[in-house]
Amino acid sequence: MVRSIIYTLAAIALCAGLFIFTQVYVNSQFDALYVAADSLYEKVEEGNAGESDAKSVMMLWEEKKTRLHIFIPHNDIGQIDNFLSEAAGHIRDSEFGLALAKLEVVKHLAKSLPGSYSVTLENVF
């Protein structure tokens, strides 16, 4: 009986630790994307952004998304891929207004997606 209680408490503690680690890890990955997208957004606003700036943000995202596939659906990752690609194309074509709109969506997704997959009452029920 005592052993069952100990095993149950150990399993609950392990699950809680896994949930906390997952949330912290996903948040840190999306925070890095947000900072990079915000930096690119500011460069686009100033008119100083080049294709290499957009490529560096895309490369950062490529590195981050390889590990995020475990935690979030591919469709959400694909959305960010699409918007970043479109922003890069607009930057390449010097269509800075359109690039700003796409980067605004990327920033919003980077802030809102981690909360969609956190263990909260609204997501559980």
Image: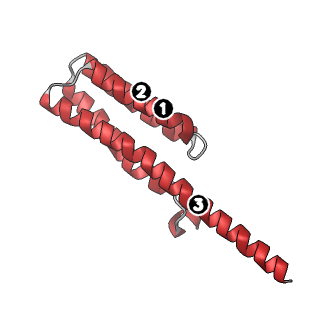
Type of amino acid at the residue the image marks with label 2: Met
Type of amino acid at the residue the image marks with label 1: Glu
Separation of disc 2 and disc 1 at Cα?
6 Å
On-image quarter of the C terminus = bottom right
Position of 78 relative to 29 (above/below): above
Q: Is residue 106 visible?
A: yes
Viewer-proximal residue among 122 and 53: 53
Proximity of marks 2 and 1: CB atoms separated by less than 8 Å: yes
In this figure, what is the number of numbered marks? 3
Position of 88 relative to 36 (above/below): above
Residue 46, by quadrant, is top left
- Residue at the extreme right of the image, as rendered: 1
Give the residue at mark 1. 63
Picture residue at 72% right of the left edge, 75% below the top: 9
Separation of disc 2 and disc 3 at Cα?
28 Å
Q: Residue 1: x and y, percent?
A: 86, 83
10 Å crowding of disc 3: few (<14), some (14-19), many (20+): some
Give the residue at mark 2. 59
Type of amino acid at the residue the image marks with label 3: Phe
- Residue at the extreme bottom of the image, as rendered: 1
Q: Which mark is residue 19?
A: 3
Position of 20 relative to 77 (above/below): below
